Amino acid sequence: MYKHVALLVRQDGLSHDEFVDYWRENHTPIAREIEGVVRYQQVLPTEPDHAEFDGLAELYFEDLEALHDALGSEGSRDYDPEKGKAKEAREDVDNFLAVEERPRFIGEEIVQKDEVDADTDGFYKHSAFLVRQEGMSHEEFVDYWQENHTPIAREIEGVVKYNTVIPTDPENAEFDGVAELYFEDLEKLYDALGSEGSRDYDPENGKAKEARKDVDNFLAIDERPRFIGRERLVKAEE
């Protein structure tokens, strides 16, 4: 399935709570009806004061063309839909988002592990927005990530679901991929992957320690935003 992830940053003058209220009460009823959207989930930070973003908006489409028609093509921070709910939603983002500070990512989601039958509503989620090391091509990065790192990461203690998202247009994407690790318990997430606001972490044992050592083989750690939040399912078509 194809996925559009918007890393949301609030406008100056808005508190995080005001941002969330507007997003949920005003924008969400529009966005959930955007043409082609088959699933829509939001992720709110567990510790807003330490989070790098105010939230994640994740819109899923069965068809990549439908995604581009609704939300613009890869590499475009902005877009200009001409009709329907997509146009209405675009006009509304100017009321609460700092659009130019909002990274976006379009990719194809690959489910690497799923112990909960895709039911992640209310779960805690660590999203790492990955940037490859200098001197490595995107293709080399993906090969290492999928073949070497993923088998380790899927076995991290406490992980009940693990997705990798690969960009559909790597040359124009802002990141080389997204890694999404789900936990039922926030304390288990922190134990495995560090607390909110920490770009790095130092687990002392198990697969989490092994995974931490391995990221030095392919990631530019300091350029990798991370986001810890709680997921809320807004829409899911059967």
Image: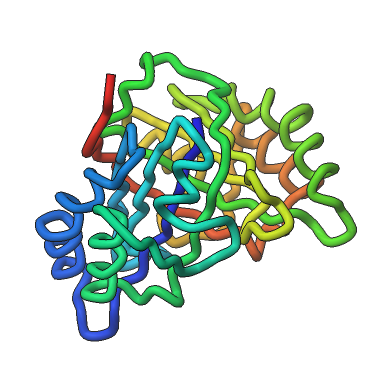
Quadrant assignment for the C terminus: top left
Q: Is residue 164 left or right of residue 198?
A: right
Q: Residue at x 42, y 55 (%)?
A: 71
Residue 211 pos. (x, y %): 67, 36
Q: How many marks?
A: 0
**Is 36 located above or below residue 119 in the figure?**
below
In the rendered image, which quarter is residue 66 located in?
Answer: top left
Foreground pick, 116 / 199: 116
In the rendered image, which quarter is residue 142 located in?
Answer: top right
Q: Is residue 217 left or right of residue 73?
A: right
Residue 16 pos. (x, y %): 22, 69
Identify the residue at the far bottom of this view: 13
Q: Is residue 195 visible?
A: no
Q: Residue at x 53, y 53 (%)?
A: 105
Residue 42 pos. (x, y %): 29, 46
Q: Is residue 222 left or right of residue 79?
A: right
Q: Residue at x 37, y 16 (%)?
A: 116
Foreground pick, 84 / 129: 84
Identify the residue at the far front of this view: 83
Residue 43 pos. (x, y %): 31, 47
Q: Residue at x 54, y 59 (%)?
A: 225
Identify the residue at the far right of this view: 135
Q: Is residue 136 left or right of residue 197?
A: right
Foreground pick, 187 / 141: 141
Q: Is residue 14 visible?
A: yes
**Is 21 located above or below residue 219 in the figure?**
below
**Is 184 located above or below residue 204 in the figure?**
above
